[in-house]
Amino acid sequence: MEILPKSFYNRDTVEVARDLLGKYLVREYQGEQLVCRIMETEAYVGRMDKACHAYGYKRTPRTQTLFAPPGTAYIYLIYGMYHCLNLVTEPEGEPCAVLLRGAVPVQNRDIIADNRFGRKENGLTRYKKRHFLDGPGKLCKGLALTREENGLDLTVPPLYVCDGPAPDLAKIHVGPRVGIDYAEEAVDFPWRFWAEEDGYAVF
């Protein structure tokens, strides 16, 4: 599989968020490749988006990675327990990123299941299989991603995105982002994208 170059990320964030649907996220872990197909994303644009951590170019120790070159991993912790993976976009210095909200496991599903649930895939209930990686915290847990991976270059191992088949256009949906009630007018920005395919549940 061909790794996406920095030029893929050095574009309009909303376009990147849509174009990431169907791509393969690869995590090299304990000598194995954990692979999943990206199914849900959200765009965040710091210069004008009140839902973005770096709205108005606000720099803090937490948001510093958002100002990094395009194609950098920005991982933060929410509620003191869930990690969220974002892919930095647009030119360096522009605090923009795409949050990966959900994916479908493709390769080494047993390892991903063990990371997520503490058991192999054949020991999961139907509900757990359907909601395997359908949330940003679930995705990071399944791929064993933490703040330790914050700042990684996404164009080289151990964490990268490869090209993949685009979902059927008829099954791509667009809507407002989740959990940003505080963001005033940005609440209604249609910057969430998800693909309706077997094996992926959307709330």
Image (cartoon, rainbow, N blue to C red):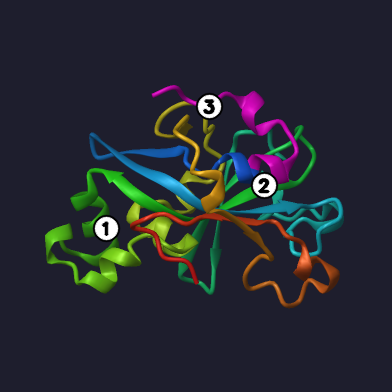
Reading the image, the residue beneath label 1 is 115
Query: Residue 78: x and y, percent?
Result: 55, 68
Please tell me whether residue 63 is drawn above or below residue 11 in the rendered image. Answer: below
Mark in the foreground, 3 or 2: 3
Q: Nearer the viewer, residue 94 or 161?
A: 161
Q: Looking at numbered disc 3 in the image, what kind of residue is underneath it?
A: Leu
What residue do we see at 56% from left, 45% from top?
Answer: 169
Q: Is residue 12 magenta?
A: yes
Mark 1 falls on what kind of element? helix
| Mark with earlier residue (1, 3) | 3
Query: Residue 47: x and y, percent?
Result: 85, 51
Query: Residue 186: x and y, percent?
Result: 80, 66
Q: Is residue 93 magenta?
A: no
| Mark with earlier residue (2, 1) | 2
Reading the image, the residue beneath label 2 is 97
Q: Is residue 78 left or right of residue 43?
A: left
Q: Looking at numbered disc 2 in the image, what kind of residue is underneath it?
A: Ala
Mark 1 and mark 2 in contact (Cβ < 8 Å)?
A: no
| Mark with earlier residue (3, 2) | 3
Where does the magenta region start and end?
Answer: 1-16
Mark in the foreground, 1 or 3: 3
Quarter of the image with the N terminus is top left
Reading the image, the residue beneath label 3 is 4
Q: Is residue 203 left or right of residue 9?
A: left
